Image: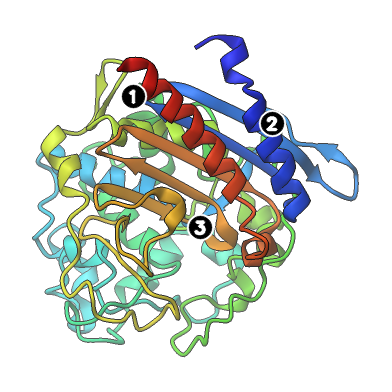
Amino acid sequence: MTASAMHDPRITQALDRALELGETGIAVAAYHRGELIVDAVAGLADAERRTPVDEHTLFPVFSVTKGVTATAVHLQAERGLVDLQAPIARYWPEFAAHGKETITVAQALSHRAGIPQMPEGVTPELLADWEWMTSHIADFAPVFEPGTTNAYHVLVWGWIAGEVVRRTDPARRPFDVFVAEEICAPLGVQDFHLGVSDGDLKRVATLYGGNDFGLVDEYNVSPKPVFPGADAHNLRAMQQAVDPGAGAITTAGSVARVFAMLAEGGELDGVRLLSRDRVASFSRPRQDADAPDRILPIPVWFGASGFWLGGKWGASDPHVGDHGDIIYSPGAGGSLAWADLRDRIAVAICHNNMDASAVMEPERTFAPVVRAVRAIIDEREAGRR
């Protein structure tokens, strides 16, 4: 990749247009056929201080985190340490309490475990206490009969999946250490943080907005003290918490590199983490995929393996593409990462104005950026023919 290609004027213009449409700070990275083709930023990391976004700026990406956490679960399955069809209680015996003994790993991955709630009384400090979180989750009683209902586990999903990984790791490493050592290090990913160190806090972009999703929260799935918006997530306690479902703070390039590994069928730059067949299975819809989700007030087209799926008109995000061999992870406020398994494309877009996702006219704020990335890819493909 030449320096001039990495700074394609189409991307610069698209990012400027995104700022005009309402973004504050924004970053995009894209891979095509395993090669980094776009890595660019624009705007302000802190609007009050007029601090510009640069290549070191870290963005909270909320549920984009789930794509990396799902990858960690599948890595354990790849190693024969997790059977996705087995009850979670096989690996986490305390989890069996109060009628949860039959809930499988696969049901949890696909948001069909029936326990979307967060513990009562959770605060940022308690959320950051892994043992407090997992002990309370183990003591949950299901809200819905396990395995029967699509019910997006907005926040709690991360600790369910993360504890399965921790319990099946022979070294019993904390989840953030597992991800750093087993996913990030092999891939050369340097800026994916599940808990930001003291020294890196100054690099974290200030979030704006996103404090009201319009979710009628009947089941305490997203309580106000830890709600995925700026009020909670600008707090140091949240920035330094290990939250495997909605807490990663990262660069677009770091996220895109993990998704590029998926787009390349589980291998990137000679490093294989997952088998090609396993990654191909990620685009399989979950059970009863067409049934409404009981938590999210939007159409949900979700997979069996922990990812949202492309190709469903009216449900899939059109930014990611228009066919079914696409897996993606959207985050609160609009952050987005996807892997196109057919066309070998991976893209991540991060930002800090969480209200910008509500902009629809004259177009969505990410639309110019996506168009520019696709124009570069189309040009590359034309050059191959």
Picture quadrant of residue 53: top right
> Could you tell me how many numbered marks the image carries?
3
Report the residue marked by disc 2: 12
Sequence-first tag of 1 and 2:
2
Q: Nearer the viewer, mark 2 or mark 3?
A: 2
Secondary-structure class at tag 1: loop
Query: Could you tell me residue 133's position as x and y percent?
Result: 43, 66
Q: Which residue is mark 1?
A: 33
Q: How many C-alpha atoms fall within 10 Å of the one at disc 3: few (<14), some, or many (≥20)? A: many
Quadrant position of residue 145: bottom left
Which residue has dot 3 on it?
331
What's the CA distance linking mark 1 and mark 2? 22 Å
Residue at the (24%, 31%) spot, across then down: 266
Of 195 and 47, the residue lying toward us: 47
* Residue type marked 2: Thr
Q: Is residue 260 visible?
A: yes
Q: Secondary structure at mark 2?
A: helix
